[in-house]
Image (tube, rainbow, N blue to C red):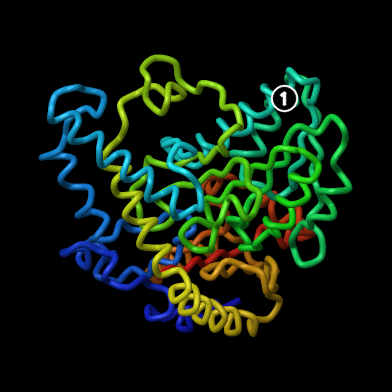
Amino acid sequence: MRIPTDRLQMRFLFPHKKHYPKGTDKAMENNGKKIIYADNAATTAVSPAVLEAMLPYYTECYGNPSSLYALGTAAKKPLEEARAKVAKCLGAEPNEIYFTSCGSESDNWAIKGAAHKMLKKGKNHIITSKFEHHAVLHTLKKLEKEGFEVTYLDVRKGHNVTAQQVKDAIRPDTCLVTTMYANNEIGSILPISEIGAVCREAGVLFHTDAVQAAGHLPIDVKAQNIDLLSLSAHKFHGPKGTGVLYARQGVFLTNLIEGGAQERGKRAGTENIPAIMGMAAALEDACAHLDENAKRVSALRDRLIDGLSKIPHSALNGDPVNRLPGNVSFCVEGVEGESLLLLLDAKGICASSGSACTSGSLDPSHVLLAIGRVHDVAHGSLRLSLCE
């Protein structure tokens, strides 16, 4: 089958040049060909504004924020300002924001901490969905080995889960509900506000992995009754290696790393000030332009979906309406995903067949199996993810 790569024009897939520092055009070439980057769900480029926000903290204001001398206190102030900026973007308070190294760390910290705390109250039941990121699923498998019981909700019509499913699964011994805000592979946006309301009414802690949503969808942790939330900077033009865990005031967090007093004594280790400053700048910029970015990217997404839908034996994955602005996910029957990616790569197009975290695996995506794709069809998946 010939894949019509001529449809995938740079103006539809390639992020604006404003997101790339000077000289990047040369780097974004492969054997003289322009590279069309359409894998923004895996990672994004650091924008010039973010890079500019980071640089002074490498060479000028490089003091340890825990130090008492002037150079140290000069780094402490912007650290707390960055915390306040992130909190504002999420509808949270600054003392509810903990800086981490990534979304996976935040997921692990939130889920393990909440589970172990609630176990002391005799509650050992957790609810999640079958199409969560492996940072959540593998953490839950580990907890199952410790004696916790986990209910995995089916992904239903529309390639989504419902608040009613969560409500029906809650038991007297339920200690935690953890569902993603939006799926990283197929783009479905979950009914987070409704799930949050169900959990708050039942008195059950609610965690959401918002790694794909932060900076792309509106988030208000208070209005949505979210107790714990994870995000990662490199998904919205921030630097790699930094993330956030939001924990509602009153929700107990176990200590993640023992040692110093950083992050209110919960996560020891000198803070990565340059990356944190970059993350705060990236999230603030993304949230300031949320509506206009979503409108523009959604229009490109829909045009791309319309074109790809005309390929014989192709099927759209994910909720056709409630989906991430930049997510396009298809299965093409009779085509191996790996072959499809190699063909696109030969044309200079960077794409994915699923989660970047499992791209080296030959097994079909657990997400696609969860939405009902048969094994052979799930092997022929393609994800194109656009950005602002």
Q: Quadrant of the N terminus?
A: bottom right
Question: Label 1: which residue?
Answer: 118
From what the image shows, is residue 292 above or below residue 273? Answer: below
Q: Which of 274 and 381 lies nearest the eye of the viewer?
A: 274
- Left or right: 380 with respect to 265? right
Residue located 41% across and 28% down the image: 263
Q: Quadrant of the C terminus?
A: bottom left
- Left or right: 14 with respect to 344? left
Give percent across and percent down for residue 180.
Answer: 64, 50
Residue pushed farthest top?
259
Residue located 61% across and 57% down the image: 182
Give percent across and percent down for residue 6.
Answer: 45, 83
Q: Residues within 10 Å of mark 1 (few under 14, many from 20)?
A: many
Give percent across and percent down for residue 91.
Answer: 51, 53
| Residue 194, quarter of the rendered image | bottom right
Disc 1 marks which amino acid?
A: Met
Give percent across and percent down for residue 26.
Answer: 19, 65
Residue located 27% across and 71% down the image: 17
